[in-house]
C-alpha cells in the first residue's frame, strides 16, 4: 500500500495526533470529525449505487451517518418503502439504510452500530440450519438474502452467515431467570420481513415491503406498524388475538445458566447450524457484512484482510475491505472500522500490519481455512489488525436494569485507579440508592453475543481500565457487545429440572437412583429424584448445581441403558399461580415425521406464534415431558399435530397421567398431518393440513367447540401353543391398547401392515399423502386374489352372546363415522335393529367387508359395510395368527382373546366451529383480531 510505504519506520494507520492532512484539519469532514473513506464496490443496495462525487452533510439520527449517493438501479426508501425518484438518495455509511431526503428527519430505526446499546433485555438467539428465504432481508446489513442464510427458531430474525456475529442479542424473553424479571410486558418489535398485505395498526395503510427492510411487527401480539406510527402505540403488549392461548413469560421460570437456547427450548440437534457458523468471530471473509466471497479488486483498488483482535487472528476470521491504492491512511482506517460496524472516533484506533506467519496460522492457506482467500502469498491480500490506542481514561455506561429504577444507564469516567468496587460506590448515589448498603451490590460484565449471553461477576479489586483494554485487544466487536450492570449480590439458589427418559419401566425409585448412579455417577448431595414415572421408564431430576446439571445433561444424552439410548431434556417450571384468569394456555404437540416436512415447518411456526416453552416435539421424549411441565396448570388445552396414530399416542399419555394432572380432562384439538386423518375429519379439522396459515389454525382452536368422544380399551391376551415336541404353552403377557377410531381384524389390517412395512424400509419416499394412497392402492391390488375366510378363523361375542359371522375377509369395530380416509363404513340407511351411531353413545358398531373390492367400493361411496352388531362389550377369539390394526397402527396378533370395552371417562375433544358466512358486499380489514377460520373438514 502506498500510504504504508511512506510511513517507513512504523507500519500503522491513523491514531496519531492531528496534523496537516489528518481528519482534524481536513476540509473533507463528516459528523463528529470523521473523514469519509471511499466506498468499496457493491456497498449500496443490490449491486450498489455509485457514490456521489460531491458529499452532502447528511443529518445523523440514532447513530446513522448519511451521505448523498448516486442511484444506478431502482431503489426504495427503508422508511416509507416508496420508490426513490431521481438519481440521488441518502445512505448510511455503516448499515446501508437508504432514505429519501424528505424522510431523513423522520428516521427512527437505529443504526446497526448503535442497536446493541438499545437492547432492553439481552436474550440470545437460537439459529436453525441454513436455508433459502426468498424476499427476506438481513437484519444487520439490510441486504437481500440471496444465498443460504440463517433464521432464529424463536423469533423472525434473518441474517447472512457473515452477519451473525454482529446481530443483537434481542430475541424474545420467554421466561424468567431470576435476573431480569419485569412487572410489565412490552412489545418486542422486529423490523421488516412482514407478510404480504401487512397493514399498519395506526394509519391502516400498507406497512410491509418485498423490496426493502421496512415496517415493524411485535413478535408477541403480531401488531404491525410503520416505524413512525409505532410511537403512537402503547408500549405494553397484551399478546393480541392469541392472548387466551399464550403461556405468558411471567408464568415460566428457568435458570438457564450453562445451557444454550437450543437446550432450553428442546430444539433437536438437527436444527442446529453447522459448526462453521459460529458467533465467536466466525464471520468469514465477507466485505463489510455483504459479499460472500473475497472480491477481485479493480485495477485502482486494493483488497485488505482486516482482523478486529487477537481472537479473530487466532481463528483466522477476517473481514475484507477494498480501498483505492492511493487512499489516505485515515480513509483506510475508517473503511476497516466500518467493516466491523464501529462508529467511534477513528483517531482512537490504528491499523497494525499482521506478519505473514500469523496470517498463515497453522500453515494452511486462507482458502483452505475459510474457502475464500487465494492460495499463494504473492497474490494474498494484505492483512491488518485494528488496535485501540492506549487510553489514560475511558467513559463507561453502567446499566441498572435489574434494579427496576427509572433510568436506562449512567455514564461514569474510569481512570487507572477505578476498580469494580469504586465504580459501584460511585454509581449507587446516581441511581438514588445511596441509602442501600454498597456491600450488597456487585458489578457484572455481560457479553451479549447473538448466540449466547455470558455473565461474569467482576472481583472488587479488578481494574476497569485494564479490563476494557483486554476486551478490546481480544475483539473490538466483543467490546461493542459488552455491557456492565450493577446488580444486587444476592445468591440465586441453583435449581435445574432434568427429564431423563428411555429407562427400563417398572422399577422403584431406589432402583432408578442406583441405575443412574451406575450409568452417569450422579452426586447424591446435588441430585434428587423429584418425580418417578415408572410405567413410562422416566424420572425427573432436581439438580442443585449448574455445573453438575450441565455435566449430567451432556452425559445422559450419550448413555445407553440395556441397549437403549437415554433422553435428556431441560424442563422449565410453570408458575401456575401467576396465570391470568382469562388465559387457558395451549399445549402443542408436533410430530415432525408426519406430513413430510410440514411437521417441522409447523414446529418452527408455533414456536414463534406462541411461547416456545408450550411447544413440544414428540420425537424428543414423547408427550410425558410436556404433561409433567403442565401438571400443576389448573386449565389448559392441547393441540396435536400428526396422524391418527399420533393422536392416539397423546390421548393414551393423557389417560396415564390423569391422576397427576390438576386439569385431568383437557380438551384436545387436531391438526391432521397423517394419511387417513379420520378423527380429524369427523371433528371438522379437515382431511389433512395443506399449508394453511398457522395463525388461522390457532384462532380456529380458540373458537372450537368441546365435544365428547368415547375411548375404548382393548385387552390382548395371547395363548399361542409352543412346539409339538414338548407341548408346553408359551404364554405372552397380556397387553392393553387404547382405541379412539376403529379396530380392524383381517384384510384391512393386512393392507395397513404391508404399507407400514414398506414405509419402514424406505421412509424418505413417504412424504406426501398422494404417494401414500398410491401405495395403499398397489398393496390392495396385490391382495385382490387372496382369500382367507376370516369368519372361520375367529369367534365373536357381543354382550356375552355369540354372534354368527357371515362370509367376510375383514371385521371392523368403528367408533367414529369415518374409516379409511373418510369413508362411511356403517352407512346412512336407517335400521330398526340398531341405534343411530354417535361418537359419545358408549357403543361400538361392528361391520364386515368381503374383500379388497368391497373396501374399494365403500371408499368410493358405492356400498357400505355389512352391519353385524352394536354393543359396549366384545370378546373376539382368534384361532390363528391374524393381522390386527388399531387407529392405523398394525401388527400380527397371536392366537388368543381380544376383549374390547369402554375405558371409562370420555375424552374431551375440540371440534372446529362452522365458519359463519359473510354478508355480501361487506369488506373488513384483515386485522389480527379478525383472522378468518380456514375452510376444510366436514360441515
Image (cartoon, rainbow, N blue to C red):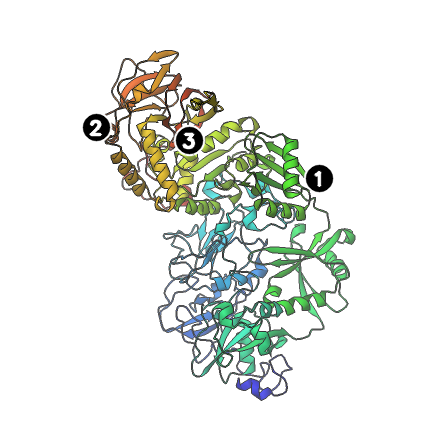
Residue corresponding to mark 2 = 862
| Mark toward the start of the polypeptide (1 vs 2) | 1
> How dense is the environment of label 2, judged by Cα within 10 Å: few (below 14), some, or many (20 and up)?
few
> How dense is the environment of label 3, judged by Cα within 10 Å: few (below 14), some, or many (20 and up)?
many
| Mark toward the start of the polypeptide (1 vs 3) | 1
Where is residue 610 shown, x and y percent of the image? 49, 43
Where is residue 833 shown, x and y percent of the image? 29, 13
Q: Is residue 161 left or right of residue 912?
A: right
Residue 71 lies, with reference to residue 904, above or below; the image says below
C-alpha distance separating marks 1 and 2: 68 Å
Would you say the residues marked 1 and 2 are in contact, meaning their CB atoms lie under 8 Å apart?
Answer: no
Residue pushed farthest left? 862
Residue corresponding to mark 3 = 910
Residue 403 lies, with reference to residue 330, above or below; the image says above
Residue corresponding to mark 1 = 524
Mark 1 residue element: loop
Mark 2 residue element: loop
Amino acid at each position: 500500500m502506498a500510504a504504508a510505504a511512506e510511513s517507513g519506520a512504523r507500519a500503522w494507520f491513523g491514531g496519531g495526533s492531528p496534523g496537516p492532512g489528518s481528519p482534524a484539519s481536513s476540509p473533507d469532514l463528516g459528523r463528529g470529525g470523521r473523514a469519509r473513506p471511499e466506498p468499496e464496490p457493491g456497498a449500496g443496495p443490490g449491486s450498489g449505487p455509485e457514490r456521489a462525487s460531491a458529499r452532502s452533510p447528511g443529518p445523523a439520527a440514532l447513530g446513522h451517518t448519511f451521505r448523498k449517493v448516486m442511484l444506478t438501479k431502482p431503489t426504495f426508501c427503508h422508511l416509507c418503502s416508496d420508490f426513490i425518484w431521481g438519481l440521488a438518495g441518502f445512505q448510511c455509511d455503516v448499515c446501508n439504510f437508504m432514505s429519501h431526503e424528505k424522510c431523513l428527519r423522520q428516521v427512527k430505526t437505529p443504526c446497526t452500530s448503535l442497536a446493541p446499546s438499545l437492547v432492553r433485555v439481552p436474550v440470545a438467539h437460537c439459529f436453525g440450519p441454513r436455508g433459502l428465504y426468498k424476499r427476506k432481508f438481513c437484519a444487520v446489513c439490510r441486504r437481500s438474502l440471496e444465498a443460504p442464510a440463517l433464521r432464529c427458531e424463536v423469533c423472525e430474525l434473518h441474517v447472512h452467515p457473515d452477519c451473525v456475529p454482529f446481530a443483537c442479542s434481542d430475541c424474545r424473553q420467554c421466561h424468567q431467570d431470576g435476573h431480569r424479571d419485569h412487572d410489565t410486558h412490552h412489545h418486542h418489535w422486529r423490523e421488516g420481513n412482514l407478510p404480504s398485505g401487512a397493514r399498519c395498526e395506526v394509519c391502516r395503510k400498507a406497512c410491509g415491503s418485498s423490496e426493502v427492510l421496512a415496517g415493524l411487527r411485535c413478535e408477541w401480539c403480531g401488531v404491525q406498524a410503520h416505524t413512525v406510527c409505532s410511537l403512537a402505540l402503547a408500549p405494553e403488549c397484551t399478546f393480541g388475538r392469541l392472548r387466551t392461548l399464550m403461556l405468558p413469560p411471567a408464568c415460566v421460570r428457568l435458570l438457564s445458566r450453562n445451557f444454550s437456547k437450543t437446550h432450553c427450548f428442546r430444539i433437536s440437534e438437527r436444527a442446529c447450524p453447522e459448526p462453521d457458523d459460529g458467533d465467536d468471530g466466525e464471520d468469514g471473509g465477507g466485505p463489510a457484512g455483504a459479499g460472500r466471497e473475497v472480491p477481485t479488486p479493480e485495477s485502482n483498488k486494493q483488497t485488505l484482510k482486516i482482523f478486529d483482535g487477537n481472537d479473530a487472528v487466532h481463528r483466522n476470521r477476517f473481514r475484507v475491505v477494498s480501498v483505492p491504492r492511493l487512499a489516505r491512511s485515515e480513509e483506510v482506517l475508517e473503511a476497516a472500522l466500518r467493516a466491523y460496524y464501529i462508529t467511534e472516533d477513528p483517531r482512537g484506533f490504528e491499523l497494525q500490519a499482521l506478519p505473514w506467519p500469523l496470517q498463515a496460522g497453522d500453515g494452511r492457506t486462507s482458502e483452505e481455512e475459510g474457502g475464500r482467500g487465494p492460495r499463494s502469498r504473492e497474490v494474498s491480500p494484505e492483512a491488518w489488525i485494528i488496535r485501540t490506542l492506549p487510553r489514560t481514561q475511558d467513559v463507561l455506561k453502567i446499566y441498572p436494569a435489574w434494579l427496576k429504577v427509572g433510568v436506562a444507564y449512567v455514564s461514569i469516567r474510569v481512570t487507572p485507579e477505578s476498580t469494580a468496587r469504586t465504580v459501584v460506590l460511585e454509581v449507587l448515589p446516581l441511581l438514588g440508592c445511596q441509602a442501600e448498603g454498597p456491600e450488597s451490590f456487585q458489578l457484572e460484565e455481560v457479553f451479549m453475543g447473538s448466540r449466547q449471553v455470558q455473565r461474569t461477576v467482576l472481583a472488587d479489586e479488578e481494574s476497569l481500565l485494564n479490563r476494557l483494554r483486554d476486551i478490546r485487544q481480544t475483539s473490538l466487536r466483543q467490546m461493542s457487545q459488552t455491557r456492565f450492570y450493577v446488580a444486587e449480590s444476592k445468591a440465586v439458589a441453583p435449581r435445574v429440572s432434568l427429564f431423563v427418559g428411555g429407562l427400563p419401566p417398572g422399577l422403584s425409585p431406589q432402583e432408578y437412583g442406583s441405575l443412574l448412579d451406575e450409568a452417569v455417577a450422579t452426586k447424591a448431595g446435588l441430585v434428587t429424584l423429584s418425580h418417578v414415572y415408572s410405567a413410562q421408564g422416566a424420572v425427573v431430576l432436581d439438580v442443585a448445581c449448574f455445573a453438575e446439571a450441565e455435566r449430567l445433561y451432556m452425559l445422559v444424552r450419550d448413555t445407553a441403558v440395556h441397549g437403549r439410548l437415554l433422553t435428556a431434556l431441560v424442563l422449565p417450571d410453570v408458575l401456575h399461580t401467576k396465570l391470568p384468569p382469562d388465559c387457558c394456555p395451549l399445549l402443542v404437540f408436533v410430530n415432525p415425521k408426519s406430513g413430510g416436512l410440514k411437521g417441522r415447518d409447523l414446529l418452527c411456526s408455533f414456536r414463534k406464534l406462541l411461547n416456545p416453552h408450550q411447544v413440544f416435539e414428540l420425537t424428543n421424549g414423547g408427550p410425558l415431558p410436556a404433561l409433567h411441565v403442565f401438571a400443576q396448570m389448573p386449565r389448559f388445552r392441547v393441540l396435536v399435530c400428526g396422524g391418527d396414530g399420533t393422536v392416539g399416542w397423546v390421548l393414551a399419555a393423557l389417560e396415564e397421567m390423569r391422576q397427576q394432572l390438576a386439569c385431568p380432562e383437557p380438551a384436545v384439538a387436531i391438526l391432521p398431518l397423517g394419511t387417513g386423518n379420520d378423527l380429524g375429519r369427523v371433528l371438522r379439522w379437515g382431511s389433512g393440513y395443506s399449508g394453511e396459515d398457522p395463525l388461522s389454525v390457532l384462532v380456529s382452536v380458540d373458537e372450537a367447540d368441546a365435544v365428547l368422544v368415547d375411548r375404548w380399551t382393548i385387552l390382548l391376551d395371547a395363548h399361542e401353543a409352543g412346539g409339538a415336541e414338548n407341548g408346553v404353552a408359551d404364554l405372552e403377557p397380556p397387553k392393553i391398547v387404547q382405541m379412539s377410531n376403529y379396530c380392524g381384524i383381517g384384510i384391512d389390517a393386512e393392507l395397513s401392515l404391508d404399507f407400514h412395512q414398506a414405509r419402514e424400509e424406505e421412509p424418505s419416499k413417504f412424504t406426501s399423502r398422494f404417494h401414500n394412497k398410491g401405495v395403499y392402492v398397489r398393496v390392495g391390488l396385490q391382495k385382490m386374489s387372496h382369500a382367507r375366510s376370516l369368519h372361520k378363523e375367529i369367534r365373536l361375542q357381543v354382550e356375552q352372546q355369540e354372534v354368527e359371522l357371515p362370509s367376510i375377509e375383514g371385521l371392523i369395530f368403528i367408533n367414529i363415522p369415518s374409516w379409511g380416509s373418510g369413508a362411511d363404513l356403517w352407512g346412512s340407511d336407517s335400521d330398526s335393529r340398531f341405534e343411530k351411531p354417535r361418537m359419545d353413545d358408549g357403543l361400538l358398531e361392528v361391520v364386515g367387508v368381503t374383500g379388497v373390492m368391497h373396501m374399494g367400493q365403500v371408499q368410493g361411496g358405492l356400498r357400505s359395510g355389512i352391519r353385524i352388531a352394536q354393543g359396549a362389550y366384545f370378546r373376539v377369539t382368534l384361532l390363528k395368527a391374524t393381522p390386527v390394526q388399531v387407529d392405523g397402527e398394525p401388527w400380527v396378533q397371536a392366537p388368543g382373546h381380544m376383549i374390547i370395552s369402554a375405558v371409562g371417562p370420555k375424552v374431551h375433544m375440540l371440534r372446529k366451529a362452522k365458519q359463519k358466512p359473510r354478508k355480501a358486499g361487506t369488506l373488513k380489514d384483515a386485522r389480527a383480531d379478525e383472522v378468518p377460520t380456514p375452510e376444510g373438514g366436514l360441515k
